[in-house]
Each structure stands twice: as C-alpha cells, then as structure tokens.
C-alpha cells in the first residue's frame, strides 16, 4: 500500500479474502482498538445472541419487522449522511444497520480521512470480521433469510468482499462509486452500481472491469453512470460533490433493487 493517497485506492484484498479461504493469515501491526473490535466480532460470530449488538447505528421500521440491509460507510466514518440513509431505509420498510468501522471516529477533511483509511488498510482482517458480524446481526434482527448490503466508496470494497465470503447471507449488493478486485466465484448475490460520470478515483475502466468480472461468474449486475457528477455525489455533507437530483435517482434505484431482490 502506498504511504499516502488522494482517495481510497483499489483494495487488493489478500487471496484468502478474495477466495473465501479460512487458512492462517500473517499478523498485522498491533492496534488496541482494532484488536478489541476483532476479538468482539469473533466472539459474536461464535456465540450469536450472547453479546450486545455491534457498535453502530440501527434504524427500525414502524412495523418492527422487515428485510435486513447492512450499510457500510465511506471514509468519513459513521456520520450523519449514513444515519440519515439508514433512517430512510427504515421508512421504506427495511431494518437498516450501519456498523461503526472506525470505532467512533468521524472526520470531515480529506487528509484526516486518508489517515483513517491507512490505519484500517493495515487491519483488513479485523475490519472484515466487523462487517461479517454486523451482517449476521442485521440478518438476526430481520429474521428473514438473505440481506442486502449497501456500500459507499470505502464501504463498497467491503460490501463486494462480503458478498463472496458470506454468499448464503448476502442476496443483494449495491455500491456507490466503489469497485473491487474480488473473486466472485462463491457469490449468490445480485449487484447494482451507482457511479459518477467524472470520478478520478473510480474511472469508467474500473466499472467496466467489475462488470466483466461479475459477468464471467454469472452474477447479474446493473450499473448506472450519473451525468455531471463526481465522487461522493450522493453524500449531502460533501457539499462540493453533492448532486441532489442524481442522489435521489440513485436512492430510488437502490430501494427498488433491494425490494425486488429481497422479496
């Protein structure tokens, strides 16, 4: 990994993540917060129902029941945009949960976000364990087989990885301006992509590569390119990039995709 980036680069997950292997992985530098989160995640997976819910934001529909959707935040952390997105999903009838992958840290400046990503890139094993735990949690709250996953930028990489390593749980995967290098041979998910027309971090070549990879494994994938938009176009707090009309169209398409795929 390069020492400094202008945005989360392609997360080239280790082979064991891409393939779904469970063989031993090399140790990463010690980080107390990440190590505790990893330990808690492992316990939750081994003993479901015996630990409190993962750290994050839960939004429930008024009915108290619905299909589960996991929401994975961008490199800013679990901010108001993500919470609002979960609230809207709940109003649409879903049980939405966004895990806090940065252990309470929320930033607004790109330089700060870069540092957070660099810290967590060194602990992909732990981050993915947190994501997996959160997926099992929202599936348990839903009580219905199969969940949806929505990932924004940084979160999109983990959404794509999760769809391959937990194929029996993930049925619908929607990403916003994020692609990945994963092997999808184990996946049983359908895919939706919302991408920007002018995105220096996720150029059209990346979208084409993802489409080709999913096609080669027989997975359905619908990709939309939103004219006159850039990275973060669906996040209101990023004022320089937010495009309300494109964000609302992407929202409508995402909700319809989730409803159709999870019905």
Image: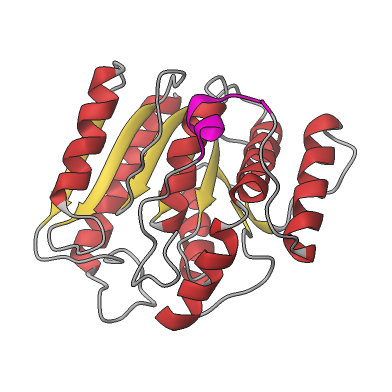
Q: Is residue 227 left or right of residue 22?
A: left
Q: Is residue 146 left or right of residue 245?
A: right
Q: Residue at x 35, y 73 (%)?
A: 236
- Residue 53 appearing in the image: no
Horizontal and vertical percent position of residue 146: 55, 25
**Count of numbered circles on the image:** 0
Q: Residue at x 59, y 66 (%)?
A: 119
Q: Residue at x 82, y 47 (%)?
A: 39
Q: Is residue 138 left or right of residue 50?
A: left
Q: Nearer the viewer, residue 63 or 13?
A: 13
Q: Residue furthest left?
A: 227
> Where's the C terminus, which quadrant?
top left
Q: Residue at x 57, y 35 (%)?
A: 66
Q: Is residue 6 above or below residue 70?
A: below
Corner quadrant of residue 51: top right
Corner quadrant of residue 217: top left
Tell me if residue 41 is in the magenta stretch: no
Q: Nearer the viewer, residue 22 or 2?
A: 2
Horizontal and vertical percent position of residue 188: 44, 19
Horizontal and vertical percent position of residue 99: 63, 54
Q: Residue furthest top?
A: 218
Q: Is residue 93 left or right of residue 208?
A: right
Q: Is residue 203 above or below residue 171?
A: below
Q: Residue furthest right?
A: 50
- Residue 204 appearing in the image: yes
Horizontal and vertical percent position of residue 68: 57, 37
> Where's the N terminus, which quadrant?
bottom left
- Give the color scheme: rainbow, by chain, secondary structure or one colour: secondary structure
Q: Is residue 58 above or below residue 159?
A: below
Range of residues picked out in magenta: 14-23
């Amino acid at each position: 990994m390069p020492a400094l980036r202008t945005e989360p680069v392609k997360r080239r997950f280790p082979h064991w993540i891409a393939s779904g292997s469970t063989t031993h992985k090399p140790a990463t530098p010690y980080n107390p917060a990440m190590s505790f989160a990893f330990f808690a995640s492992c316990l939750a997976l081994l003993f479901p129902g015996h630990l409190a819910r993962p750290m994050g934001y839960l939004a429930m529909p008024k009915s108290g029941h619905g299909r589960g959707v996991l929401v994975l935040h961008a490199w800013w952390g679990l901010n108001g945009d993500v919470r609002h997105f979960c609230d809207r999903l709940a109003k649409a009838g879903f049980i939405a949960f966004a895990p806090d992958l940065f252990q309470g840290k929320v930033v607004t400046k790109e330089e700060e976000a870069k540092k957070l990503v660099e810290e967590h890139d060194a602990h992909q094993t732990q981050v993915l364990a947190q994501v997996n735990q959160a997926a099992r949690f929202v599936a348990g709250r839903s009580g219905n087989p199969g969940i949806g996953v929505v990932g924004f930028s940084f979160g999109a990489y983990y959404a794509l990885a999760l769809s391959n390593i937990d194929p029996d749980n993930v049925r619908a995967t929607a990403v916003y301006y994020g692609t990945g290098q994963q092997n999808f041979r184990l996946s049983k998910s359908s895919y939706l992509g919302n991408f920007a027309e002018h995105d220096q971090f996720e150029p059209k070549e990346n979208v084409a590569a993802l489409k080709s990879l999913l096609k080669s494994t027989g997975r359905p994938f619908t990709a939309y390119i939103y004219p006159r938009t850039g990275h973060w176009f669906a996040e209101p707090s990023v004022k320089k990039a937010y495009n309300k009309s494109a964000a609302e169209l992407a929202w409508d398409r995402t909700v319809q995709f989730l409803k159709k795929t999870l019905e």
